[in-house]
Amino acid sequence: MGTISIYIGRLYKDFKGGILVLPSRTIAFFFCLLLLLIPLITTEPYILRVLILSSIFAIFAASWDLLSGYTGQMNFGHALFFGVAAYTSALLNLHVGLPPWLTIPLGALAAVLAGLIVGVPCLRLRGPYLALATLAFPLILTGIIFVIPGITGGELGISGIDPLSGSRLTDYYIAVILMLGLGFVMWKITASKTGLIFHAIREDEVAVRASGINTTRYKLLAFCLSGLFAGVAGGMYVHFMRIAGPSTLELMLSFQAIIWVIFGGIATIYGPIAGVFILYPFMEFLRIIPEIRMLVFATLVVLILLFMPEGLTTWVRDKIEKECPRCKLRNIATRKSCRVCRADLD
Amino acid sequence: MIEAIIINGLISGGVYALLAVGFSLIFGVARIINIAHTAFYMLAAYFIYTFAHLLGLNPFLSVVLSVIIVILIGLVTYKLVIDPVREHGATTLIVTIALAIIFQEVMLIAFGGHFRGVPGLVSGYTEILGVKVTYQYLLTFGVVLVVLLGTWALLMKTKLGIAIRSTAQDREVANLMGINVARTGMMTMAIAVALAAIAGALVAPLRVLEPHMWMPPLVTILAIVVLGGLGSIKGSFIGAFILGFAETLVVFLVPSGAFLKGAVALTIMLIVILIRPEGLFGVAFEEER
Amino acid sequence: MNRVMKGAILLLLACFVMVAAGCPAPVVNEIKIGVIGPMAFVQGEHHWYGAQLAAEEINAQGGILVGDEWYQITLAQVDSNEMLSVTDAATAMEMAITVENVDFLVGGFRTEAVFAMQDVAMGYEVIFLGCGAATVELCTLVADDYETYKYWFRVTPINSSYLGMVDFLLLGMVAEEIRAELGIETPKVAILAEMAVWADSIVAAAYVYLPAMGMEIVGEWRPSPIATEVMAELSAIEAAGAHIIFTTISGPLGITYARQWGELEIPAASVGINVEAQKEGFWDATVGKGNYEMTMNTYARVNITDETIPFIDRFVESAGEFPTYNAGTYEALYILKAAIERAGTLDSDAVVAELENTDRIGTAGRIVFTDAHDVTWGPGYVTGLGVQWQDGEMKCVWPPADGSWEGVVYEGAVDYVLPPWMVEYWAP
């Protein structure tokens, strides 16, 4: 009894010190909690569907952020990873009969391969050249899909794929937990030494190379990691929607990812997740005015970006928190001095 | 067959060149990847349709009016939404995507998703080397040459051109030299949008008028501009003809693979920039810091 | 005390008012039918207009008699946004079923999206009457896995392999005309088909049937379904010396194609499927250059059945446009009404059983479903039409006015005309 209460006490202390100390962490914590508890409030299949799709796209958007937001390697053809994984999972499921829990990782591996295939030749390219070269890959692949309709189904796509689990609630928990888990992993990667190097490559590649770091290897790593996570999203999408078609490679899907990330806040990982969970359900909400749905959406994006060019989460974070000028730790905005080094904050 | 390939290649290259040059210009000067560029082309086409077809105005007058209106819209959007965020590269990009979607949706609400036809400025066809070519295509080709010469003269021979080019090379130094960088940006935007609007007047009668018509040429233009070297007008011009010929060759040599012409064009672009990462005529940037 | 009484009375009154307000009005039975389609596009608009027209008519006649109770139809417009996003289409479908609680669904257009929507509808065991996608596979699913997919029926158009049949009949007619008028015994055919699976089967069949039909294939051009122009293709086709261009085009390319074909006076008759030429707006969209373009169609102002022309008139009156095949939602609602009335219940399985017994003389012909829940094609059933644009009007030219195809003649049909520039070019 005593030990349990000690543990609970310690847990509470960790909770207070680790999560409640910063408003952004508190928000993130309650966001996770809310997502996990939503089925207690409603099991309306439509709502769960929207949240499942949001989760899948959140992984997708965050994976773009991991590559382009952190290393600055602008990828305009992110749908390539999504589509490659989607088709791979679909084909493995349909023809080899593998279950979803195998096809999704295998699809993700195929996406990693795609990351390598794109990454290696593109290493020499910089800035807009890279962006526009990557844009070409999914479109070329779409052409190939139409060359071999016997395998890919051409414009019809591949249908008759096994569902993720068969129950909407299970699907929901798979998607949400996977999203939170992978989101956390991506966030940890960016906070690690590797993430620091990614950051540095974006800011000044020459300086990084001068420090004896093989930037090529790290850029390739970023492509592969990003492909892996985007691939998981693609595989999940296929097993949830039960169809893999050329729409998984569309230009608009690549652009969507970028819109979500920039809207949410680039180079943050949690920004894209927030971006998707705000914009995707909002798009659904706009179904009440179907005629001007896209117009309202696009206008909102423009307005938000005019006022918060760094994205929503970054803007909010800067409002509710400030960085200690001495130790660079983040503090709640109401504090006068840093919570660690006691330096003056203003 | 050779004659047909040459003429068709020249013609489709001309159409692409007209669309690509404006895009290249605004990137070269302001470093803005303006995804909405072809949306201005779409807007111009709709204005011409409204003036010429619905209101029954003279076709040439409609074109002039449309070009002016589209330039004004371009300047207003530049001032209001593009300029304020231009320091944030990625944000600019999203803003221009969103702008294109806004234009598309407004046209969708105003005109519906119906496919329409814009009347051509001239009708009929002639035969060149035994190959039939419509006058509209010939006119387009002629205007492309004039426009390109005009743009070249403007950039090379006028004070404004010098200002634009120096701003393109080094914004800060240009500013220090007393060039009004903000105004130069505005002027460049006006020229680029005008080029897009002229393309709308000439190319739209050769295509179908609909709110999503800005998307298909966009990818080709991006490919051309990258292939030729970003910001290089000469590059865009030559790139447009390379892709125009490549696509025509695909249609003539592998007819059952005609659907691959887009993919082939993109592959050519990829191969070129993998060999020359700065494109054919792009400036090789030093390792930028 | 008095004050307490007053308060109590007020409270009571308030309660009464609230209860009265909350009390539902006299119960009106309603059947909710979702009309799902790309509402920003012509296809979705026609889904909606067709269904609206049928619902108004049925409701004016008292509605649908289920058992011994009358039900009114309420329509729910569901924008699938399927042209731009397949994900959206499936979500819209789910929302219609679970949030708006529709009882039945009609509509759908883009094949990839219809597969996704079909899947959702079947999951909830909601009857979905397809009015837009022609792909055979949508119905093969019913044959393969009846228990899961039995809630799907296709009302319009005839499926892609039947479309192919009609296609070759039209082609044969044009070839016959060329033989008779120009004395060319073995007309040369250029195949111009968009690169899509639905077109593949037609192209493959062309290689089998055309030689047997006394025609020679001079080439196969396959532009992308999202191509925007076919100038080079047309040049190449003319250079190949074709007499006939056999088209299979579903997208806006059909407009650019017909416009340039007419403007350049390519000396080859154009016949096949050109979906855009089925619409009234085709004439304006091609600025009149699409004259003599011929395509298969579902509706034309001919007497397919006695229902056809009155339907077209009413549709034009309410929608202001000539109906495309997507307006078959009109048909779908009547079929549904009949099946529900025969079943005497709204239970999906019972209605499915009755839908299978459908035999209706409809606006596009007699509708009987096959075992795969597909609309039956053939003389005496839905036949499809061949229409040709003649000086601004869409005229029915097939089944031929002389009754040379199975004796089927629709009153109002006219003769097919070869483009005059072609006659001039090849005249003996």
Image: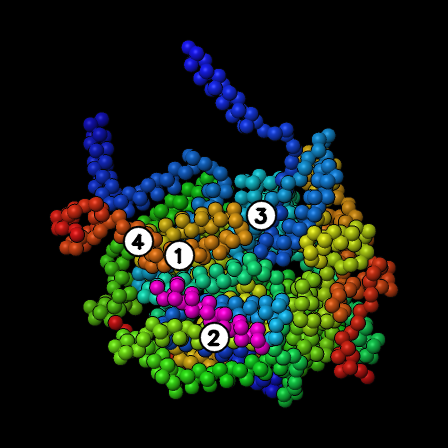
User: Disc 4 designates what residue?
Assistant: A315
Rounded to the nearest whole Å, what is the CA distance between mark 2 and mark 1? 26 Å
User: Disc 3 designates what residue?
Assistant: C78
- Viewer-side label of 3, 2: 2
Rounded to the nearest whole Å, what is the CA distance between mark 4 and mark 3? 36 Å
Q: Amino acid at mark 4?
A: Trp
Does dot 2 land on a helix, a strand or a loop? helix
Whether callout 2 and callout 1 share a subunit is answered no
Magenta stretch holds residue B83: yes
Where does the image place residue C223, in percent across and percent down from the top left? 60, 70
Instruction: Categorize mark 1 by other alpha carbons within 10 Å: few (<14), some (14-19), many (20+).
Output: few
Q: Please say if the residues under marks 2 and 1 sit with CB atoms less than 8 Å apart.
A: no
- Which region shows up in magenta? B60-84
The quarter holding residue C260 reads: bottom right
Q: Amino acid at mark 2?
A: Ala
Q: Which mark is residue B194?
A: 2
